[in-house]
Image (spheres, rainbow, N blue to C red):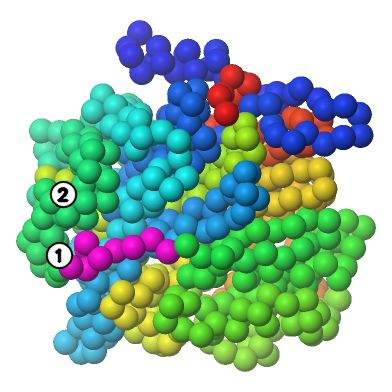
Amino acid sequence: MNTLSRRWLLLVLLWSPVAWSAAPAQGSLASHPDGAAIASGHHLATEAGMEILTKGGNAFDAAVAVSSTLAVVEPISSGLGGGGFFLLHDAATGKDVMLDARETAPQAANEAAFLDSKGELDRDRSVNGPWSAGIPGLPAALVELSGKHGKLPLRTSLGPAIRIATEGFPVYARMAKGYASRREVMERYPGTREVYLRNGKPIAEGDVFRQPELAATLTRLADQGFDGFYRGQTGKALLAGVKQAGGSWSAEELAGYRVKLREPIVFNYRDWKITTASPPSSGGIALAAMLQILEGWDLKSMDEAHRTHLVVEAMRRAYRDRTFFLGDPDFVQIPQKVLTSKDYAQGLRATIHPEKATPSDLLSGNPTPLEDDETTHFSIIDRDGNRVGATQTVNLLYGSGLIPKGTGVLLNNEMDDFALKPGTPNAFGVMGYAANAPKPGKRMLSSMTPTFMESPDKVVVLGTPGGSRIITMVLLGILGYDDGLTAQQVAALPRYHHQWLPDEISAETGALSVDTIKQLQAMGHKIDLPGDSAEGGRGSSHVWGNLQTVEWDRRSNVLSGGSDPRNPVGSAAVSAAASR
Ligand code: GLY
């Protein structure tokens, strides 16, 4: 048995995904969990977090371990070359904050930089290679998390990621399949070829994938903190690699990257206090609108068709507003108070017919961005009740495809989340507007929505990847918890989505019953079902998302985790042995 499989066996013996309980006296609520819970998109990342907890780390140290390990084992979804949002709850102070580690637009990347000689959007530039990449935020987030919130040295918390990058891990199907789909772009760049080709052949499922240069980059980050990535050897190699590939980043803007601390969006839905992502994520504001619209009805007593109709109508209205009002709050004025108010939601609710779909073109405006399906999320509760919900990304599969030579760092292609040419569809057939136009130093609008839910006796952390569908998946997850589902049931929930334009409900196979589909169609809804692409529809032949959630029931003091069954390498673990 090799080291990896021995370690895995040991961890399986130590941790169980089943709940751990040491119930408090009857009628009272536990003040802290009797263990810890982590759910993430790769079992090695979940294990890395548990390892750091057993070394005496808290949820924030564990988050550094999970996030950096995902950067190693899920390059398809996130990494040091990307960014993310980290929603943090400090149990000692009771405070919540969102650590915004979203990428920023480089100085050279204005709208003109993405137009070809005919003035059209240069699609290759916006999603492939150096121009598609924003200045990465994730390494700065790891330094901030460890230094300001953690108990262990950064070197310790980055230890599992460095070890796995050095020793390697088995390539899984999604990783190999994703590589095949991005191969042409990735193999343009010598730094990427060095990492992904073995004797000229691309990585294949089951290969052990080692990343010694990424291990060295992580080690410099561990030893030197911020400067270990944004300046010095790594910084220079990043600048040189971007330049060699035809792009343009300056040393000042790389070293000038800063994470931002943002106040989360907070609102109530029925018995739940919801704490969620604020701009430059669009998720929290959209969730507040949708849930406060839906609060006006008793969804639990409705048949599936009427419930789906009302949820879809709430989605439609929230996504319309997302298009016009949301962008980087440091650059655009967002009417956040209005958009998240109960009065505004009540007004929107009044425009919803209980039996009829509202055609989207009756709601003024133009199409909204549809984003990609990649990205990754993890959820953590530690034994003190600290929480982390983090969604991180490099945008599309394997980001820009560009690894600057000698760094092992795959750069994001997050620039495509900007509205690069107003009125012109991006890679996903969508438009963008002024609030989300690129400007030097600006953060591109995101849908990433890490979220906390708190009821009088429950605490939940949840989130998922999935582009613009992230927000509606989190919405369905919140409704699922409110219906009394378990964490694993919430992670497995079938999904449907509406984003105002295109004016259609898309749904996973089996998400809506035949009878519900018929009733929805009779109400005037268009439904894009798997297979429809053959008939001219977009089709929804793939499943969506990768929801990772943990729940703490304070009445029974039971911790549980839910890991999306759509992702065979994800895992949720609950530990009674983790230290505080
Ligand atoms: N790139 C996906 C998002 O930030 O929403």
Q: Residue at x 42, y 82 (%)?
A: 331
Q: Residue at x 79, y 50 (%)?
A: 455
Disc 1 to disc 2, C-alpha distance: 11 Å
Horizontal and vertical percent position of residue 537: 54, 69
- In the rendered structure, the answer to whether residue 370 lies left or right of residue 362 reads left
Q: Hey, which residue is sitting farthest top in the picture? A: 1
Secondary structure of the residue carrying numbered label 1: helix
Q: Amino acid at mark 1?
A: Ala
Whether residues under marks 1 and 2 lie with C-beta atoms below 8 angstroms apart, the answer is no
Which residue is at 21% across, 55% downward? 230
Q: Which quarter of the picture shows residue 449?
A: bottom right
In x, y percent, where is residue 405?
A: 11, 49
Q: Which mark is residue 251?
A: 1
**Other-residue count near label 2 (Cα within 10 Å), few / some / many at <14 / 14–19 / ≥20:** many
The reply, left or right, for residue 223 in relation to residue 175 is: left
**Magenta residues, as a range?**
252-260
Task: Give x and y (percent) for residue 554.
Answer: 78, 37
Residue occupied by mark 2: 234
